[in-house]
Image (cartoon, rainbow, N blue to C red):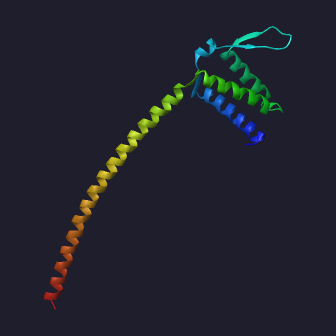
Amino acid sequence: MSNHSNLKNDVEIVESFIQGIHDSEIIIDHSARDVPFTKYELEQPPQRRNLADVLGLMFETYNEHKNDNLKEFSAKICARWIEKARIFGVVKEGEALARKLRDCNSEKEQLQKTIDEISDRNIHLEFENRGLHSQLEESEKFQRLFVQENK
């Protein structure tokens, strides 16, 4: 896979993740505050943060650069932090996704009822059709007899 497609994929990962958060399909569990990270820079004191703060900072940085030439770079870094959050188990299914699943299951049950009703009606119509077909055959027999008798 080319480096360009990796960068596009990173943008899609970040955009999808942010949209999932906005739609409440994804939540970052409060336990992300309990996952410490330390940033070390040359000639600087170590900066201690937690995963929740780092994710917030990464999303903020991505949003600041999503319309300039640093978009792909910030997406790459942000996507790596999203992956770390998933590894630490702090990315959870949101209420909206659970509600959508319940709604889909409810719709599935309604559709199954409709299918069952239509199937029952189809069986009834097939039975009626056979009865009408038998009556037609009987009628045609009587018509042939009547024609033969009146010749």
Picture quadrant where residue 14 is located? top right
**Residue ID at (46%, 34%):** 103
Which residue is most to the right? 43
Which residue is most to the left? 149
x and y percentages locating residue 78 in the rendered image: 72, 26
Q: How many marks?
A: 0
x and y percentages locating residue 40 in the rendered image: 79, 13
Q: Is residue 24 visible?
A: no
x and y percentages locating residue 145 in the rendered image: 15, 83
Q: Quadrant of the C terminus?
A: bottom left
Which residue is most to the top? 45
Q: Is residue 104 left or right of residue 46?
A: left
Up the image or down, 82 lies above or below 136; here it is above
**Residue ID at (24%, 60%):** 127
Up the image or down, 110 lies above or below 29; here it is below
Q: Is residue 81 visible?
A: yes
Q: Is residue 22 left or right of residue 43?
A: left
x and y percentages locating residue 114 in the rendered image: 36, 46
Picture quadrant where residue 37 is located? top right
Q: Quadrant of the N terminus?
A: top right
**Residue ID at (42%, 40%):** 108
Up the image or down, 115 lies above or below 12; here it is below
